[in-house]
Amino acid sequence: MTQQQESPALVATGLVRRFGDKLAIDDVSITVRTGTLTAILGPSGCGKTTVLRIVAGLDQPDAGVVTLSGTAVQAPGLHVPPERRGVGLVFQDNVLFPHLTIAENVGYGVPRSERKATTTRLLELVGLADIAGQMPHEVSGGQQQRAALARTLATDPRIILLDEPFSQLDAHLRERVRSDMVTAIKRTNTTALLVTHDQEEAFALADEVIVMSEGRIHQVGSPQEIYHHPADRFVAEFVGDATLVAAIPVAPGYVETRLGRLDISGQFPRSDEFAVVRPESVVVRAADDAEPGALPARVVGLRFQGVNHIVDLELDDGMRVLAHVAGDVALAIGDAVSFRVHGPVATV
Amino acid sequence: MPRHVPWVALLAVTIAATLCLPPLAVVLIEAVTAGSANGIPASRLFELFSGTVVLIAIVTACTVLLGTTTALIVTRTDLPGRRVFSFLVMLPLALPAYLLALAFVGLGGGAGLASQLGALIGWGPAPAAHGLAAASLCLTIASLPIVHALVVTALNRLDPALEESARLVGDSPARVFVRVILPQLRTPIATAACIVSLYTLSDFGAVSVLRYDTFTRAVYSQFRGGVDLAPAFALSGVLISMAAVLIVLQAILSGPPMPVASRGRPPLTLRLTGTAKTVAFSVLGSVVLISLIAPLGTLGFWAVRGITAGVQPGPILAEASNTLQLALLAAAVTTLLAIPLALSSYRGTSRLGRIAETLPWITHSLPHLAIGLGFLVVSLALPPAFYQSTTMLILVYVAIFLPVAVGAQQVALRQIDPRLFEVSRMLGRGMWSTGLRVGVPLVWRAAMTGALLVAVLVSQELPATLLLRPTGTETLAIRVWGAVTEGQLTTGSIAAILLVALSVPLVAGHHRATLRVRQI
């Protein structure tokens, strides 16, 4: 439990950055605990990369303070240059030095005396020992990205910043490179801050997720909290599929909606204007096999995903509801069905 | 990375202003003051003006017509060997015009190579090469590659889909050329015409060798003729005004570069058969014969004749060594001083950066004879050690050729992903270490190519060298230029062949060379 006494790897408070008269980030504060992987999740242009660049020292905020392991590196009148922050950065497409081999790239930031040993160790860690002597343009995108990570880890940074590091990779490669890279980060016990627009990626990798939009932070929490207890309408709609339906509180733990009376027990409603109905809580049955209280609907959209169908249902008044149906159920567009919402739902 | 490093721009402006402002100021002030008190009769001025304009008009018209034709043949027909031809047509770009002029002198006239060959089959003597006709031919050949290259580049950038669509709606290839291709070539052709006009106006060597009176030749003879520099400055004032008009016109026309058509397929080519094939072949063949084979053959002929006649090689070798030393020294200094200028324009151009870029471009574009005169007056105002010193000569070369070195470095700098520098900083390297370990290795090759180009251009430079060289420092260029007046075709040709040998690196690196006005 010594971790508790230690100051967090990164604390940023009240960051503001203007570009012209546009506010890129507006009063952003984040904390990354030592040894964890935190993700900043948000649509492109939400300001998440600006936060990263300020932490790295590549950009300066108009206001705000950044401390790394308790040491201030950015404050009014203080700007520690990037090379003296002990921060690592991996870009979305690898930025390897084109005039150096893979091994020379990995050893770039390491003092001469340790260069050989460190380079060998890290090349092995990311599984690139056999291409050490090749030039960056001779190896695959995934290998380049792993080399870029190894180069950063080689300097033993206090925190490593990952700027959409997997988004340029082909879908079939992404999974593999991602798990290799996270394994390497975890094995070296490195604290990491990942920026991504892919919620599936944030959920899969992060211990804690920070949801950002238009320069502001909407919610901070574990992936489960973010998904099951979204803080507001933006988070509910941005993170995962959901149907939002207007809600009126009728009894403790219940709201009345167009989809029937819904259970909101276990929630800490910050507001209860809308119920957030996730597709997995919508149970669909054949029209002639309706549960009590079920609503009739028609199938208007169908995406087969193997385990599931993602089904787009239309009610008689035109309202749309998303539902999951087991993949082995035969369904076709135009089918008449019935459905009911089960279990507790979140409200926003 | 800091948002901007103003001291780099400051350093760049300081270098550019120190080098280029004094001669520019001198030339402008002297031109204005001398203009009111000069002793040049109006009739002489008119004579020079009309002579210069007629030469410019003929050369520009000929190069535009011929250059567009050669460009069309190599890009839009299936003529066999068109790539080789395109390369051969470009080659004279590496040769200074006065060298071609000397070759024509050795070709024509009673004792010329053409007459000697003609006599074998019973022809009379060929006309001597001098005057308007010879000057027009020589400068047309020297500047044809400028038009050819610009039009080929433009043609390659046209979207082939436009021509295909025109063909599909029923236009013949000739109509496609008039209705689709030509309208799109207007700006590149106008730009090329401007550059050729400026080249012709600025030429000093060829018109001197071929004894045709233009402003440059008159400025130099005024300078040689008297102690009073005022008439020379008055004439150079007119020369500069004409050049200024062309430079401004060129700057306006150049504008943003044409976008490259994204379709990665070649355009439709015209299948040449029968007569058309013969005509196309003859056009390209004659161009190569007259601009390359005949001049180099003539120079080779006279050089061999000189060597077999037992010409003392000593003086020429000394000149070659002088040329090489000056060229390498000037290239090294130019390349070093170009670094801050290239850097200051790397991340967005500030006002300071733009000044630092424009000043050397002006000294580069104006006639070198005028710039040389300006430097001469500046050196007279400095301590006596500067007058006719190697230092001064090198500084003139730097002022004239700085944009060549800057351009080469800029091209390489622009290709560097700025995040490479950020990555290096993040990995703990400071600004200087980053520059040394990332910047230098990535710019090195281009900077060396630029240095090579500067060295070749310096070795060929004539007017400024003529005005400012230390007494006793003779170069190959001066030998070639003086060969005609002294009637020494043989030694001149040997010097010319050595100059050609020195320009081989330029040809080798020619795909990297930017097309700038080369003035001799």
Image: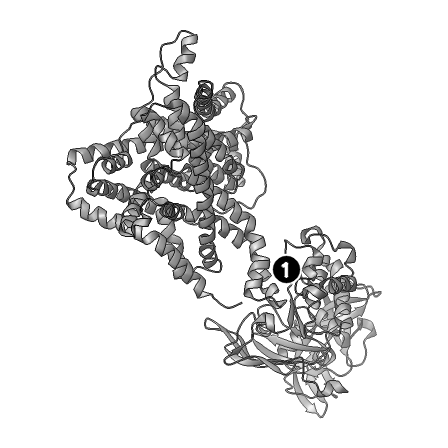
Crowd class of label 1 (few under 14; some 14 to 19; many from 20; radius 10 Å): many
Location of residue B340 with respect to B66 vertically, above or below: below
Measured as percent of width and height from the top left, residue B143 is found at 40, 33
Which color scheme did the rendering employ for the protein? one colour
Which residue is under mark 1? A95
Check disc 1 and give the amino acid type.
Answer: Val
Q: Secondary structure at mark 1?
A: loop
Q: Quadrant of residue B471?
A: top left
Residue A304 at least partly seen: no
Q: Is residue A340 left or right of residue B316?
A: right
User: In terms of depth relative to the viewer, which is nearer, B430 or B139?
Assistant: B430
Q: Nearer the viewer, residue A326 or A159?
A: A159
In the displayed image of the protein, which residue is found farthest to the right?
A328
Examine the image and state in which quarter residue B315 appears.
top left
**Quarter of the image where one finds residue B179:** top left
Q: At 42% across and 58% down in the image, what residue appears?
A: B12
Q: Position of residue B352 (x, y in %)?
A: 39, 61
Residue A74 in view of the camera = yes
Image coordinates of residue A255 in percent, x first then y, are 69, 87
Relative to B38, A231 lies left or right:
right
How many numbered discs sit on the rendered protein? Answer: 1
Residue ranking furthest to the bottom: A252
Where is A196 relative to A217, above or below? Answer: above
Q: Position of residue B70 (x, y in %)?
A: 46, 30
Q: Quadrant of the C terminus of chain A?
A: bottom right
* Letter of the chain that mark 1 sits on in the rendering: A
Q: Quadrant of the N terminus of chain A?
A: bottom right
Reply above or below: B16 against A247.
Answer: above
Is residue A92 left or right of B286 when viewed as pictured? right
